[in-house]
Amino acid sequence: MLRAGRWPKYDQYEITDGVVHPAADARLIPSYDPWDEYVTVWQRRQRPPRKRDDPTGPKRNNSRQPPPYQELLKLAKKLPQAYEPKTGVPLMGEVEPTPGQRKQILAWCRRDGLLGLLQHETLAICLAPVWERDEGEEHLHAVAHAWQRSGAGWTRDRLRYLHVIEWDTSLLGKPVPAARHGELRRARDHRPSRGPQLTAEQAASMPKSLIAMIDPAGGLIRRPLSGTGLEVVPLNGCWRDHFPTRPEWQTPRWPLPSPHSVQFWHSYGEPLSAIVDAAHQLRWIMETIAIETPEYRRPMAAERQRLTSALDHLASFTANVWPRAILDVEGKPQVRWTAPSLLGSFALMIAFDLAGKGTIRTCACCGTPFASKATQAVYCSDRCRNAVQQRTFRKNHPRGGGAAPVEH
């Protein structure tokens, strides 16, 4: 089974100004890997059943352990959401969670961590330029620090504008004033010899088309979950939404923690509304694909249109998941899928389940959609199946003895 790596998670979370983030004394759980749980569940289903004439053979584990994304789907059912009347697609940011629902969100975050929405949507980050001096030079250069995400992870780049200089060395480390940003724009518009000087490695890791989209004041290039293409977002507004406890980061400039550093993750947070929206989007995808009866039938034209829309939404969740060739412990090449976020991992798990198990059904107990290859599957987990069995047993065996009352 192909994996996509570990994910940072803390043991405590709290809410500040509508943003969920790790508590000040939260402890990082470095060994957390959601794919370990998913692979274990997947491998159990792949074991062949024991042959009758071979009692010593491997026994197939028929327990219904849900995949990691199942808890997020159950959480979505407990949260209110507004839907588009015509298409039924969940609307973004329309419902505010109640205090009780906020506690449920925090409980889920303690189990799985944050979704990583900023990392999922972001392709490049470029900070506002500052004055820096290279070794052996007397004057200062305008330098912009940036990060670019690829299948190998985050890489940092240092963009130096050779023709935007300053002789006052007391400005070392201070931001380039907005009045001189016009010089930076002109440097970008001229031929490569007059613009930012990049090494071959830097030019390969950060395409100039992305650099040209970002304003000299700094910005962030993202591919939103709505799938509307790339967009440029100012850093100030974006950072306020994700770092409520770090006021010094409200105007981000170098030095700033790398997107994969512990300092970055300990301060990182996500708006409540964004977590609710993403959870409802995944649940809507699963519910749209789910069938209500064990018998398969070819979908009608209107149903096929809804299924296509759901798969397109799932594709927008996996758009930033990239394959990468690596060497395993034995030195053999293999393909590894790298997901920039927990949300991307969950979407990739759902895609694997669609391809491997094929059928999405709705649990008869909790109403949560789940994937199964068995045509007789009714419940999403052993917990739901046991709950129904206990409920039926109590109904048929009431306390005090005697048979259950006969309904007329």
Image (spheres, rainbow, N blue to C red):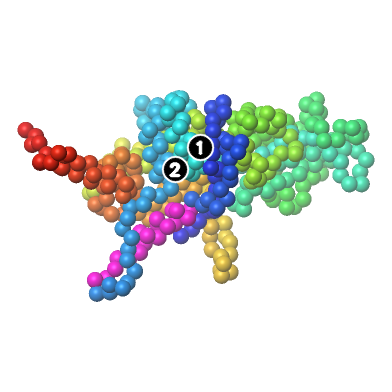
Question: Is any part of residue 100 visible from this angle?
Answer: yes
Q: Position of residue 115 (x, y in %)?
A: 51, 40
User: Residue at horizontal 44%, vertical 53%?
Assistant: 38
> Badge 1: few (under 14), some or many (20 or more) residues near its Cα, within 10 Å?
some
Q: Earlier in the sequence, mark 1 or mark 2?
A: 1
Q: Three-letter amino acid code at disc 1?
A: Leu
Left or right for 53, reference 73: left
Residue 46 magenta:
yes
Disc 2 marks which residue?
A: 314
Locate residue 258: give its quadrant: top right
Q: Three-letter amino acid code at disc 2?
A: Leu
Q: Position of residue 21 (x, y in %)?
A: 57, 35
User: Residue at horizontal 49%, vertical 39%?
Assistant: 109
Locate residue 305: give its quadrant: top left
Disc 1 marks which residue?
A: 225
Above or below, 172 relative to 298: above
User: Residue at horizontal 93%, vertical 40%?
Assistant: 138
